[in-house]
Image (cartoon, rainbow, N blue to C red):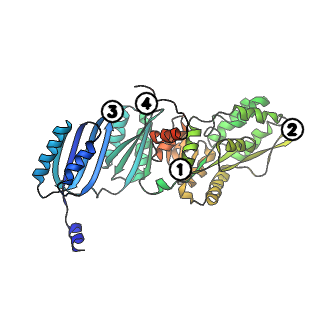
Amino acid sequence: MATANRRADQTPQTVLITLTGHDRPGVTSTVFTTLAAFGVEVLDIEQIVLRRRLVLGVLVSSPRDPRALQQAMERVGDELDMQVEVERGTGDNRTRPDGRSHVTVLGVPLRPAAVAAIAGRIADTGANIDRIERMARYPVTAIDLHVSGADPDRLRVLLAEEAARQSVDVAVQPANLLRHGMRLIVMDVDSTLIQGEVIEMLADRAGCLAKVAEVTEAAMRGELDFEQSLRERVALLEGLDASALDTVYESVMLAPGARTLVRTLKRLGYRFAIVSGGFTQITDRIAADLDIDFAAANELEVVDGRLTGRIVGPVVDRAGKAAALRRFAAEAGVPAAATIAIGDGANDLDMLTSAGLGIAFNAKPVVQQAADTAVNVPYLDAIIYLLGISREEVEAADAEAGIVTPAPPLL
């Protein structure tokens, strides 16, 4: 106990060893075999490899003979043909500033000027970038910055403005256990999980597309009451043959990366829900196709094989979507704080703010401003990177399951 108290009261003397050079098998083993002879304690390790260029940093407690350790490490450097730096100092790297965040940057492409601007705004807050990891190289470039020393909410506002100027996406999340505890994904359907709006596809077959599209756009901007606008649009479909529902379902195109998102996260134990202002005749079939766990949407009334222009039961509107999220979270046995909501329109706002993490996906400006973060690349599976999962991990899991993924483009 006396030894423990003494260590707590004194700043430890430490040695930082940094090796740089071409990576090869056995580097790490050689370094630690050498260190083992000096009876030191390993306090921290960081290693990265870029195009087979290795940077390895090892922080150890100070040995009895620091000079002998330095000479031994210089011999290791000569043996491995690597540059070695040995720096004596104090501190064990455990104490970092309060306010720790994950800042994920997505770009297509990601240009140096954008990275410089984001890093500059982080520095402006007095925060520090402790670590940088690449999460994906294609179809988007995604990097995750581990940042300390800034309030995440303040950082989110500042970086959102810079992201807009640089035409990249930036997501800021507190670095806490909640990021690893997200277990229910709740998604909007039209223009989020799928491309386009189902009601417009139906309207095209009913010959009233222009009028319906006009009302839809106004509703998504939040200019019209959703329920009123929905009933107005559905009324225009009166008399449409119900077979049009089958035709529309067969023409539905999922957002790029939708299957990858669902497949990958379900492997990790996530559950999925879709909540839509659209129609059960379409959404229930999508849910079955993707193995979605929960679904809520409106039901079109069909009589004698034709749409009546009416909706059966209460409308799933803005408040209804948030209520569905809470209901599905309860059924899944997770708190609302452990949910992620993804949407694009004003009708999704309550759902996004009710979730632990609200993501505006290629959304209207009013939604981007209200959500926790915005993703504007066209790939729905980019959301995986916000959860700390890399593209390489996704592809490795797919390969084990016998799923072939496209090869990355050559640089």
Q: Quadrant of the N terminus?
A: bottom left
Kindly identify the amino acid type of the residue bearing the numbered disc 1. Answer: Leu
Question: Is residue 236 in sight in this rendering?
Answer: yes
Mark 1 or mark 2: which comes first in sequence?
A: 1
Kindly identify the amino acid type of the residue bearing the numbered disc 2. Answer: Gly
User: Position of 169 compared to 187: left or right?
Assistant: left
User: Position of 224 compared to 102: left or right?
Assistant: right
**Mark 3, mark 2: which one is toward the viewer?**
3
Mark 4 or mark 3: which comes first in sequence?
A: 3
For the residues bearing labels 4 and 2, Cβ distance under 8 angstroms: no
Mark 4 or mark 1: which comes first in sequence?
A: 4
Q: Residue at x 27, y 42 (%)?
A: 26
User: Could you tell me how far apart the alpha carbons at marks 4 and 1 are, in whole angstroms?
Assistant: 29 Å
Mark 3 or mark 2: which comes first in sequence?
A: 3
Q: Which numbered tag is attached to residue 109?
A: 4
User: Could you tell me how far apart the alpha carbons at marks 4 and 2 are, in whole angstroms?
Assistant: 49 Å
Q: Which numbered tag is attached to residue 200?
A: none
User: Could you tell me how far apart the alpha carbons at marks 4 and 3 are, in whole angstroms?
Assistant: 19 Å
Image x and y of residue 348, in percent: 61, 47
Q: Which residue is mark 3?
A: 51
* Residue in the foreground of this view, choosing between 40 and 284: 40
Residue neighbourhood size for the residue with mark 3, other residues' Cα within 10 Å, grouped as few (<14), some (14–19), many (≥20) = few
Q: Which residue is mark 1?
A: 268
For the residues bearing labels 4 and 1, Cβ distance under 8 angstroms: no
